[in-house]
Image: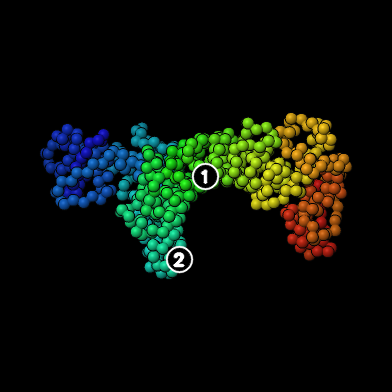
């Protein structure tokens, strides 16, 4: 439409009977819809005029029959709007005709690409583009919901539920709404008292009339707007600016247009400290572009957004303490260096990022890295190698590490032995997977690799201790552990060959006060084992033909209810 405007009237579009006429006498500046009478002149309405007509119908404009009405609507007004259909959300990418069919169509890109049928093309003509080759569809406007205002959704979810009895279900569009949080509401009976509001998947698309949010829920501190039909940050700001105490905001599973001047919306997030943008399709560069809106932000969750590259934050996110980058396929570990100088970052989630390489180039093995200066907790569930663990040793403040389901836990060693290797390799680590067991892990680590250390040039005499560069790169903490505990005795380093490997080795009396780890330590010394692993099980006369594994090293024998007469079986793996 290129800046042109046209006039529609309710009287005219109500009596068109499907015959729309374009009057070229207005030189393409204004369009007039009129009845088509027999033998009347005129041309069929051009495709771009269809766009304005559907916008007129969707806005619900009212006028007296026959009265002229003028409404200026830019061409991109409907494109970008969020809609829902049969429980699935989508973004409008096209509004207009799709020949040879008659009538108006919406071209949409589905959040779930499996819901679509094509990439925005039809019979060789491209109408719009999609990220996924099967993420697009054409649907009629009457088949979709364009959403409701914040307060309308709030009343449907909360106030209507207060009046219903017997667990009556509430429906929005074609979907049944989960009704939660009524315990407090049943006592207070008023939404004005709510400090936490969840409108997840309630088709919220706009803030509604001026000050309506403020008048309805003035005390909200935590707000969940995930999975709604919000399409731009201006609409989000229209809601949050009326919630002066809002500290936590969840916006996952929405799709937003990026604002041109985000700093102009900063007043709408003056108290915001926690923000979730999981699965919104936002890139890291877009995060940094929007960051001036969130000046006091302390926790940011951008999980599952397809982020592959990071950029260095400049004068933004400087108060950030928690960053969740999980389920984003980062290109490589060097991307982390771009966020390493965030001055207050304490927790970093790298779960399922595919991280396999990490190297702090300016620090040699065994030295301390000057960035990530406050990071004490790191979550990692990725396909990476021991070299990555060695690099984590350089982070002086790293005290807690979570690495559940990491492949290193399954590479030919028991889970407990691998845990000990993690702890021993990262000197400042206090908690691994929420468990503390440092001393035993470090002693076992020394025994496991002492022979390799000596073979590479290591020596008990500190003046003669010159292990190879390769060994120091693979085990950067080993020499410091030898200085801390001393090198194992010669007898502990001799290889012992057992002809009954993987079979029953011995039977021990039970000592209920001893932990499994202490029992294993005793066995290591008695059997002169260094790099072998032990597996403990026991049998009981009360459970015939059943062997019970004792796989928690931190538990005492009493934990397994071992009694006199029971037998502990020791296997060397």
Q: Which of the 4 quarters of the picture holds residue 159?
A: bottom left
> In the rendered image of this protein, does residue 135 appear above or below residue 228?
above
Please state, as top left, top right, bottom left or bottom right, where the C terminus lies in the image.
top right
Residue 40, quarter of picture: top left
Q: Is residue 200 visible?
A: no
Q: Residue furthest right?
A: 491
Q: Looking at the image, is mark 2 or mark 1 earlier in the sequence?
A: 2
Q: Where is residue 30 drawn, in percent x and y?
A: 18, 37
Q: Which of 188 and 243 lies nearest the eye of the viewer?
A: 243
Density class for disc 2 (Cα within 10 Å; few <14, some 14-19, many ≥20) is few
Residue at the far left: name it: 39
The residue at 19%/44% (across/down) is 70
In the rendered image, the vertical position of residue 358 relative to residue 81, given as above or below: above
Name the image quarter holding the N terminus: top left
The residue sitting at 16% across, 52% down in the picture is 64
**Residue 184, disc:** 2
Tell me: 396 left or right of 182. Answer: right
Regarding residue 307, the answer to whether it shows in the image is: yes
Residue at the spot 55% in from the left edge and 41% down from the top edge: 343
Eyeballing the image, is 350 above or below 243? above
Q: Residue at x 61, y 37 (%)?
A: 370
Question: Observer-nearest residue: 138 or 453?
Answer: 453
Q: Which residue is mark 1?
A: 320
Q: Position of residue 240 (x, y in %)?
A: 39, 51
Few, some or many C-alpha atoms within 10 Å of disc 1 (few <14, some 14-19, many ≥20)?
A: many
The foreground one among 518 and 136 is 518
Mark 2, secondary structure of its residue: helix
Q: Give the CA distance from mark 2 to mark 1.
A: 32 Å
């Amino acid at each position: 439409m290129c800046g042109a405007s046209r006039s529609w009237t309710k009287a005219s579009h109500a009596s068109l009977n499907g015959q729309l006429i374009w009057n070229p006498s207005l030189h393409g500046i204004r369009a007039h819809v009129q009845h088509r009478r027999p033998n009347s002149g005129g041309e069929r309405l051009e495709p771009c005029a269809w766009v304005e007509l559907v916008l007129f119908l969707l806005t619900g404009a009212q006028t007296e029959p026959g009265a002229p009405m003028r409404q200026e609507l830019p061409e991109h007004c409907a494109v970008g709007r969020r809609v829902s259909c049969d429980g699935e959300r989508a973004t409008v990418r096209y509004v207009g005709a799709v020949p040879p069919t008659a009538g108006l169509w919406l071209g949409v890109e589905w959040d779930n690409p499996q819901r679509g049928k094509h990439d925005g093309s039809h019979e060789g003509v491209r109408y719009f583009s999609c990220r996924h080759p099967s993420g697009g569809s054409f649907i009629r406007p009457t088949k979709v919901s364009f959403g409701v205002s914040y307060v309308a959704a709030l009343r449907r979810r909360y106030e209507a539920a207060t009046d219903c009895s017997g667990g009556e279900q509430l429906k929005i569009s074609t979907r049944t709404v989960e009704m939660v949080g009524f315990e407090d509401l049943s006592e207070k009976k008023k939404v004005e008292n709510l400090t936490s509001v969840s409108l997840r998947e309630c088709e919220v698309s706009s803030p509604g009339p001026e000050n309506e949010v403020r008048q309805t829920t003035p005390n909200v501190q935590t707000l969940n707007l995930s999975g709604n039909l919000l399409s731009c940050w201006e609409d989000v700001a229209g809601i949050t600016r009326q919630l002066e105490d809002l500290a936590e905001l969840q916006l996952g599973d929405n799709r937003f247009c990026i604002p041109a001047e985000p700093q102009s919306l900063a007043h709408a997030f003056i108290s915001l400290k926690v923000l979730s943008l999981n699965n919104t399709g936002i890139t890291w560069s877009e995060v940094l572009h929007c960051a001036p809106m969130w000046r006091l932000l302390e926790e940011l969750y951008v999980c599952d957004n397809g982020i592959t590259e990071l950029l260095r934050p400049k004068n933004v996110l400087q108060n950030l303490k928690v960053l969740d980058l999980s389920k984003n396929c980062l290109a490589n570990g060097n991307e982390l260096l771009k966020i390493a100088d965030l001055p207050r970052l304490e927790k970093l989630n790298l779960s399922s990022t595919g991280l396999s390489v990490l190297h702090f180039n300016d620090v040699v093995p065994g030295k301390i890295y000057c960035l990530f200066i406050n990071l004490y907790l790191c979550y990692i569930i990725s396909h990476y190698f021991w070299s990555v663990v060695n690099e984590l040793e350089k982070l002086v403040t790293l005290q807690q590490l979570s690495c559940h389901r990491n492949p290193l836990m399954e590479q030919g060693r028991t889970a407990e032995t691998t845990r000990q290797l993690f702890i021993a390799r990262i000197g400042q680590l206090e908690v691994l997977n929420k468990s503390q067991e440092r001393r035993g892990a470090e002693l076992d680590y020394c025994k496991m690799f002492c022979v390799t250390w000596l073979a590479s040039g290591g020596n008990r005499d500190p003046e003669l201790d010159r292990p190879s560069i390769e060994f120091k790169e693979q085990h950067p903490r080993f020499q410091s552990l030898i200085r801390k505990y001393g090198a194992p005795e010669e007898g502990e380093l001799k290889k012992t060959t057992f002809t009954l490997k993987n079979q029953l080795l011995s039977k021990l009396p039970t000592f209920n006060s001893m932990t499994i780890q202490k029992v294993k330590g005793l066995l290591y010394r008695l059997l002169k084992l260094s790099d072998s692993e032990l597996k403990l099980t026991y049998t009981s006369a009360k459970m015939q033909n059943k062997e019970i594994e004792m796989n928690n090293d931190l538990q005492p024998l009493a934990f397994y209810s071992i009694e006199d007469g029971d037998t502990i079986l020791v296997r060397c793996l």
